[in-house]
Image (spheres, helix red, strand yellow):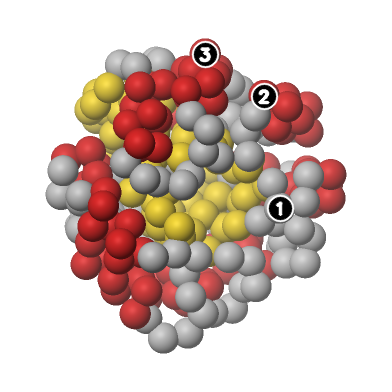
Amino acid sequence: MILYPAIDLKNGQCVRVIRGDLEQATVFNSDPGAQARQWADAGFHWIHVVDLNGAVEGKAANAPAVEAILGAVSVPVQLGGGIRSLPDIERWIEAGVSRVILGTVAVREPEIVREAARLWPEQIAVSVDVRAGKVAVQGWTEDSDLDAITVAKRFEDVGVGALIITDIDRDGTTMGFNVDAFGAIADVVAIPVIAAGGLANVQDIINLKARKGTPIAGAVLGRALYNGDIVPAEALEVAA
């Protein structure tokens, strides 16, 4: 299982929010590049970056911070938030992003995801952000009428590298993972699933790995990592 320490960007700073509410942002580091180096030096093999302002605005809003992260580490970076077109995707891949995360367009313009996956195989991930059973879009400010499995199944066999399933109702709360919810999607979709939203401690990682059925490919580490509730070395050992 791959662990993805999260760097959520708001106004150029590394923050954590609760259930996507940008008004409840806690700043953890004003230097995104330094934060990325800290996680890479701790032994993580990927960095998960989200442009929170961009997700709401529908366009890149924290590009300098993302570029600072890319320049600071040699480990691969996956990036989401406000990426809505093929030119947007191409720009970030050329800038050094290893995997581009698409969420809103996966609901509203799935053909963009399919074409992107054709052009950049395994470098596209689909973000499926779930609130009260339905997929949210536009930086979680709007709800669709689609469930997670319906959205996920749109992209079977098109070359998508991963599905990032976020439990919005638990995101940023350290309430613990809803293992059954992540597993229900992993069991019916061939695309590797990365779990996000609610991680509380190393036991959540153990529970994810222990569930029967299709293995969960990865987990995003957020507030619990920043708070010190998760020690990187312990988490990495459990995941391995």
Quickly name the residue at label 1.
122
Dot 1 or dot 2, earlier in sequence: 2
Dot 1 or dot 3, earlier in sequence: 3
Quickly name the residue at label 2.
95
Name the side, left or right, on which 209 lies relative to 231.
right
Q: Give, as a three-letter code, the residue at label 1.
A: Glu
Give the x, y percent position of residue 106: 66, 49
Q: Image quarter for residue 83?
A: top right
Crowd band around label 3 with a 10 angstrom C-alpha radius: few (<14), some (14–19), many (20+): few
Name the side, left or right, on which 29 lies relative to 213.
left
The reply to whether discs 1 and 3 touch (Cβ–Cβ < 8 Å) is no
| Residue in the image at 84% along x and 44% along y | 119
Name the side, left or right, on which 83 lies relative to 214.
right
Give the x, y percent position of residue 149: 58, 68
The reply to whether discs 3 and 2 touch (Cβ–Cβ < 8 Å) is no
Crowd band around label 2 with a 10 angstrom C-alpha radius: few (<14), some (14–19), many (20+): few
Query: SS class of the residue under badge 3?
Result: helix
Quadrant holding the N terminus: bottom left
| Residue in the image at 78% along x and 45% along y | 120
**Number of numbered discs visible in the structure rendering:** 3
Name the mark nearer the viewer: 3 or 2: 2
* In the depicted structure, whether residue 208 falls above or below residue 197: below
| Residue in the image at 55% along x and 50% along y | 127
